[in-house]
């Protein structure tokens, strides 16, 4: 039973941290380099930034589920 409660605590803590991070930084961007043209050894490349948005409901849900799992892990441990 100890390993199950430890697993709940770890997963709960990770979800809480991800929920807090999602609320603190709701958007981020990634950069992708693509080849635009290639002529022999000459390559023309372009860098493209792609924005990504984390909906607040997803961050809040991760936070709530993480808190519930932490509580369940603590109750099982007792």
Image (spheres, rainbow, N blue to C red):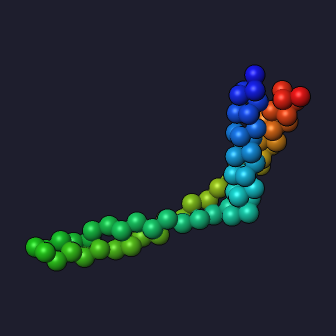
Query: What residue is at 45 percent from the left and 68 percent from the top?
Result: 31
Relative vertical location of residue 58 with respect to residue 42 in this rendering, above or below: above
Residue farthest toward the top in the current orientation of the protein: 1
Q: Nearer the viewer, residue 1 or 40?
A: 1
Relative vertical location of residue 26 with respect to residue 63 in this rendering, above or below: below
Relative vertical location of residue 63 with respect to residue 51 in this rendering, above or below: above
Residue farthest toward the left in the current orientation of the protein: 40
x, y percent for residue 8? 74, 33
Q: The N terminus lies in which quarter of the figure? A: top right
Q: The C terminus lies in which quarter of the figure? A: top right
Residue farthest toward the front in the current orientation of the protein: 2
Query: What residue is at 74 percent from the left and 45 percent from the top?
Result: 13
Q: Which quadrant of the figure has residue 67?
A: top right
x, y percent for residue 14? 70, 46
74 left or right, relative to 55: right
Q: Is residue 65 visible?
A: no
52 left or right, relative to 45: right
Relative vertical location of residue 31 with respect to residue 22 in this rendering, above or below: below
Q: Which quadrant of the figure has residue 37?
A: bottom left
Query: What residue is at 74 percent from the left and 34 percent from the top?
Result: 6
x, y percent for residue 69? 78, 35
Q: Nearer the viewer, residue 20 or 74?
A: 74
């Amino acid at each position: 039973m100890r390993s199950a409660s430890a697993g709940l605590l770890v997963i709960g803590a990770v979800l809480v941290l991800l929920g807090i991070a999602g609320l603190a930084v709701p958007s981020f961007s990634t950069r992708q380099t693509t080849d635009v043209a290639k002529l022999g050894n000459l390559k023309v490349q372009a860098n493209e930034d792609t924005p990504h948005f984390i909906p607040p409901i997803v961050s809040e849900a991760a936070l709530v589920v993480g808190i519930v799992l932490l509580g369940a892990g603590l109750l099982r441990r007792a």
